[in-house]
Image (cartoon, coloured by chain):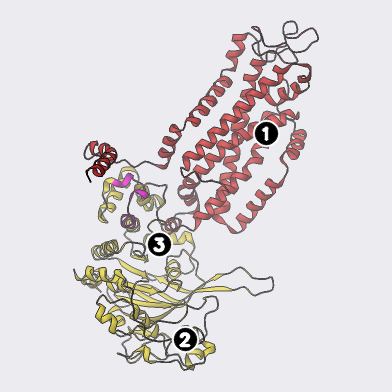
Amino acid sequence: MSDNTSASGPSGSAATAGSSDDVLLRVENLVKYFPLKKSGLFQPREYVHAVDGVNLEVRRGETYGVVGETGCGKSTLARCIARLYDVTSGRITFDGRDITKISQRQMRPLRKEIQMIFQDPYGSLNPRRRVGSIIGDPFAIHNLAEGAERKRRVQELMELVGLNPEHFNRFPAEFSGGQRQRIGVARALAFRPKLIICDEPVSALDVSIQAQVLNLLIDLQSELGLTYIFIAHDLSVVRHVSDRVAVMYLGQIAEAAPASDLFVTPRHPYTGALLSAVPVPDPDVSDRRAQIILVGDVPSPISPPAGCRFHPRCPKAAQVCVDQMPVLEPRLGDGPAHQAACHLPMAAGENLADFRPSIGADERITEGGVDVFDEVPFDTVDATAQALRKGSQR
Amino acid sequence: MSIISSAHGEAEAQPVTPAGGQPVGKKIEGRSPWRLAYERLRADRAAIISLVTIIVIVLCAVFAPVFASITGHPPNVQYVNTGENAAGGPVPPSSLFWLGTDSNGRDLLVRIVYGARISLEIGVLSTLLAVALGTILGLAAGFFGRVVDTIIARIVDVMLSIPFLLLALSLAYIVGPSVLVVTFIIGGFSWAAVARIVRGQVMTMREKEYIEAARALGAGPWRIMIIDLLPNVIAQVIVYASLLIPLAIVAEAGLSFLGVGVPAPTADWGEMISTAGGYYQYGYWWFLFFPSLALLLTTFAFNIFGDSVRDAFDPRGGQLFV
């Protein structure tokens, strides 16, 4: 979204030509189920449908944002791509190579090309090890550098991410959250990977620190030509960094589009509802705006709803949504880049609050037996959005 | 206002002075968890006293031959004329035999310091064995999970449910008692508790993001276990080991007491206490008292020290196991 990222797009992919070469990562029909403990001897085994048929393509040098609520499967998707989890079915192609089923041993050399930055800056660094040793891990594991050479390269990395190289002998506990996240970034950068999967890299940080770390990531991208998969639940953060965005709901992609399109003309009602919940810093605008509050919670991923997974909560739901699973494809004359999995997509300027679902209460999540889709003034102010807006204006 | 402010001023001046007096730019040094534990241990008076006691006992054991040469009484020599009374019983403490003699007319002091050798040897060796076995199996069970965990966890359950004395007695009886056999029996029975502690710790850490990060970097299972997991469990293992040593010493004394410990005529506290039990009623109190005191002092010192080590590693004062 920002000038930084759009500028880095071409420079990152300058070495490769042609549109098919442009795709660094392709995920086809990815499925990941987690088995649950059987509830009884003769009960069928149940599964958590964490990721259920996800398709996406990440191009070289871009930032691909993935947003969704907690538990929608975005972190599972990340760990499947990094092959930290074994995939139930589907196909992952990285840099032209099928990595879906390869063993951990075969995966080893590829680890240098796919790296992860984790959510929790406190949990992702071993508290008993010194920072120099943590950042030096990549070199130690792959026998890339020893002794003084390793120390030199570790200090280079620390400098690259804005840490004082003198501090390599400290423990993680001696750093602040933002500094710890920089340590995580330095560790991920050691190999100069092609793809970095950022799993909510800023959601555990203070707002002012979030902007710092985001800007560091953006700077590093243009400097090193990195490709990011950027996972977050904060729409304003994703908007700030992403070129393209996918919205996930219950293990599936509800809508995928260039960031500029998605935030202006959302097609999927879920996207529409999410966007209406993004706080607006101007109280006058905020009061006038229609706020769509979805009813109930996300249904259980153990037995997701049939048809469109969003239909029990969707204000536009009709019988077709119960009967048929919608395909992720361009809707309402959008270009091929803007895809939505919805039978009844939203037109531009449409207000979700004007709709009432046309399906029976049986299929719906209701509150006190009554559907509630009223306009509710939004009164909590999310400081994140404000701070980020300030950050992107700069 | 003036009264209040002056009172406050004095109270506040106290903490400010040392901070202000510090030289500008003094480096704040990061201290490792080990260093912190060491410093806490040093400040703990009970730890120092028990450690000194342990060192004295160890020195006695190491320099046992010196005691033999000073008194002129080797541990296994019977002094039929000077060391036994008219009835053939032990003689009380005197200038000749500082702590008296045993029922065979041997110097009790010399035998006690020689007995310390056996106790410490078996105590430390069997603990090392238990810690090594328990740590390796616990790490493997906790990290690999699934079948490996099921197998190891069941073995641990079985080991912990077997009555120690019963099996130890029969084992020692079948194989024939010796220092090595007793060490293996005690070590072989103590590892299960260590394995259980390590397994539990590892299971809580297995899902931590830093383990995932290590896997994402391409670290293999052995590297993760040794580099990432072991440093996080080693403190608990050390604490448990320091409490395991006195247990092992008592267990060894117990086996010897029951006659399946270290074979005679080797000096051994358990064997001495056992024999002395038969003489106590006739007034030969020193024969029972001094070996018992040695055993008590040793286990007490190790226990106190073990507690201090635990406190040093966990300053919050919470319970480490449970």
Relative to residue B105, is residue B251 depicted above or below?
below
Circle 2: residue type: His
Q: Which residue is mark 2?
A: A311
Q: Is residue B159 left or right of residue B4?
A: right
- State the residue in front, A369 or A324: A369
Q: Is residue A290 left or right of residue A322?
A: left
CA separation in Å, label 3 and label 2: 40 Å
Q: Which residue is mark 3?
A: A110
Chain A appears what colour? Answer: yellow
State the image coordinates of residue A86 (x, y, percent, origin top left): 50, 67
Q: Residue at x 59, y 30 (%)?
A: B300
Q: Are marks 3 and 2 in contact (CB under 8 Å)?
A: no
Which image quarter holds the C terminus of chain A?
bottom left
Name the secondary structure under disc 2.
helix
Quadrant of the image occupied by residue B150: bottom right
Which image quarter holds the N terminus of chain A?
bottom left
The answer for which chain carries disc 3 is A
State the image coordinates of residue B286 (x, y, percent, origin top left): 69, 17
